[in-house]
Amino acid sequence: MYQYNELDQTLVNERVEQFRHQTHRYLNGELSDEQFLPLRLQNGLYIQRHAPMLRIAIPYGMINSQQLRTLADISDQYDRGYGHISTRQNIQLNWPELEQVPDILAQLATVQMHAIQTSGNCIRNVTTDQFAGVAADETEDPRPWCELIRQWSTLHPEFAFLPRKFKIAVNGNASADRVAIRFHDIGLQIKTNSNGETTFDVWVGGGLGRTPVIASLLKSDLPSKHLLSYLEAILRVYNLFGRRDNKYKARIKILVRSMGIEAFCERVDHFWQPIKNGPLTVQTDRINRLRQHFSEPVYTPIHDEQVLALQLSLTPGFKRWFEHNVQPHRVSGYRIVTLSLKSNDRAPGDITASQLRAVADFAERYSFSEARTTHEQNIVLSDVREDLLFELWLELSEQQLATPNINTLTDIICCPGGDFCALANAKSIPIANAIQQKFEDLDDLYDLGPIDLNISGCMNACGHHHIGHIGILGVDKKGNEYYQVSIGGNSGHHASLGTILGPSFYADEIPDVISKIIDVYLAHREENELFIEVVERIGSKPFKDKLYGQKAA
Amino acid sequence: MAKKQLDLKTGQLTEWPEKYSDIEHNPSAIRLNSETSQEQITELFQQQSFPELILIEFPMFTDGRVFSLATTLRHHFNYTGIIAATGHVLPDQLSYLTRCGFDWLELVEESAPSSTLQECLSFFSVRYQPS
């Protein structure tokens, strides 16, 4: 993974000292709440319901054993011994003291970590596929490009005070989109042209939140040397013309929609032409140097399929886990393993300090000392030798990290909700846990096939409820918490937004509501049809009828 | 009290030059703000030769348009004169101002103490971007 050079380390160290200075001035009364707000947000620090929340960047999800151990130490020393993996592959601490945040940042800097631009109206952590570099069907490893964008966007002098936050995602896979590029301010799809050169399809103006929008294609086949100048032109147009009078209409999606994609494209072009071949041009040797940071490890596969077959046939628990949490690897003899952070006894995405240390150990012993966080709020060990899977499974099971439910209904994406977040209208974690409890029987669960279930505690949509096959949104009505249910959302290459089924429900009705939705699916399913395929085929009416009776029609 | 300015390149505090004390009546200087459009700038530069000084006002420190405005003056209109900032600016924004092409900060009532301004000017010795 990427290793800091002297410039990277100096910049992060200087940012720590700058933030220490800012915190000091705030505590001294030299900065008002209003002035400190964007400064602390640009460094990942929120003031939450109970305490500040610090969001630490995990650039495009890559993290090593040493960093995992440092996070564990920090969460023990400054917090309550756990962290939360966010849907943008970052990790959040829920209980730090404001006064101690500069020290936390200083400790993070010693292991090449920071909290720069994990919040605020600036360019946020770039996200990508958790299987980058190891997926069998990948066009190109997106991570060198993510790192290039990370560097360009970090402390960019012009774009620190945008109208609103700005999220970029990169996908290097033609057949799968695990990144949801069509729901980002900018989504980049890596392609290869007929000369074997890297190009990008640039999608713009997608997003969730109050106004969910599927992105429009802004430019096809952008030559890779122009990537940064083109991004800069888009950001310049957004910064100059995006709305600032209403924060709910300030995202780039609103600007793109009001201008129309053609006019927006012309504007971008106007600002792009003068800088197109300037100093932002991506030189081949620069991207090649970044690629070296992500070169493949020395694989030493041992091909003994009989042992694995025997283990699978003798141990049903291992077989279940293998079938659901283990994916094929580009290199035969290796597998990609997903550690599930989803079970009914924890908040989705939560991980304790001792689990962080265990993951650090497992990464070291089984996966070249590296792990990845996923936007589904799980953790991936990307390079596990096939003959070691059984041993790893035993160890993961001891740590409660082997729940065999990846991509199933109980692998729920969920925001922290009303238990922690000051913005939330309703709690989301107890809803997730209640559903997980209802669908505890694994055989029944597996029979349902892959289903994305997403829960957000408010319309800011951090749990991405619009793009869940089933989406649940917490709403507040006269001080009471209710839940609106939608179906048919899809985050991948066949992007779609969910349809709201009808009036909202009480919290304790939700598990039964989900059961009824599942019943409709099972009643209509033909052969191996997936949940989302049934919804696309029969529409939402049969589901509405089941939930609300015929009158809903 | 005479007005002062902070030279963003050197960190020196100096008197605000007398000849720019009344910008509205000085043909060699103009005042812009975050609402100024690219079309207005084009028009301005068609009517007159480059002014010696462009003063850009921050209505509030979170209005980031000002950074892009200065950048376009430098890189799209190739303006080479002085760009000065005034209004609601945080000390923490000074290095960004410099890098977007600003030369001066006019000190106004709401400006932070000059020692804080000078201290904040030099937090970073490195950067990722070309300018």
Image: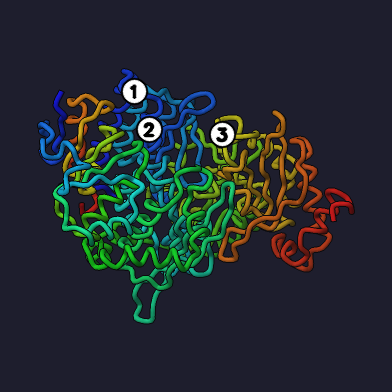
Badge 2 and badge 1 in a common chain: yes
Residue neighbourhood size for the residue with mark 2, other residues' Cα within 10 Å, grouped as few (<14), some (14–19), many (≥20): many
Indicate the position of residue A36 as horizontal and vertical percent values.
37, 29
At 56% across and 34% down in the image, what residue appears? A423
Q: Does residue A389 appear to the left or right of A499 in the view shown?
A: left
CA gap, disc 2 and disc 1:
10 Å
Indicate the position of residue B131 as horizontal and vertical percent values.
20, 52
Mark before the other along the chain sequence, 2 or 1: 1
The reply to whether callout 2 and callout 1 are in contact (CB within 8 Å) is yes
Which mark is drawn over residue A423?
Answer: 3
Q: Does residue B129 appear to the left or right of A542 in the view shown?
A: left
* Residue under numbered circle 2: A40
In the image, A82 versus B119, the foreground residue is: B119
Mark before the other along the chain sequence, 3 or 2: 2
**Chain at tag 1:** A
Give the structural element (helix, strand or loop) at label 3.
loop
The residue at the far bottom in this view is A194
Q: Does residue A66 appear to the left or right of A202 in the view shown?
A: left
Question: Does A109 appear above or below A365?
Answer: above
* Residue under numbered circle 1: A26
Indicate the position of residue B50 as horizontal and vertical percent values.
16, 55
Which mark is drawn over residue A469?
Answer: none
At 26% across and 65% down in the image, what residue appears? A274
The reply to whether callout 3 and callout 2 are in contact (CB within 8 Å) is no
CA gap, disc 1 and disc 3:
23 Å
Residue neighbourhood size for the residue with mark 3, other residues' Cα within 10 Å, grouped as few (<14), some (14–19), many (≥20): some
At 48% across and 65% down in the image, what residue appears? A261
Query: In which quadrant of the rendered view does residue A70 lie?
Result: top left
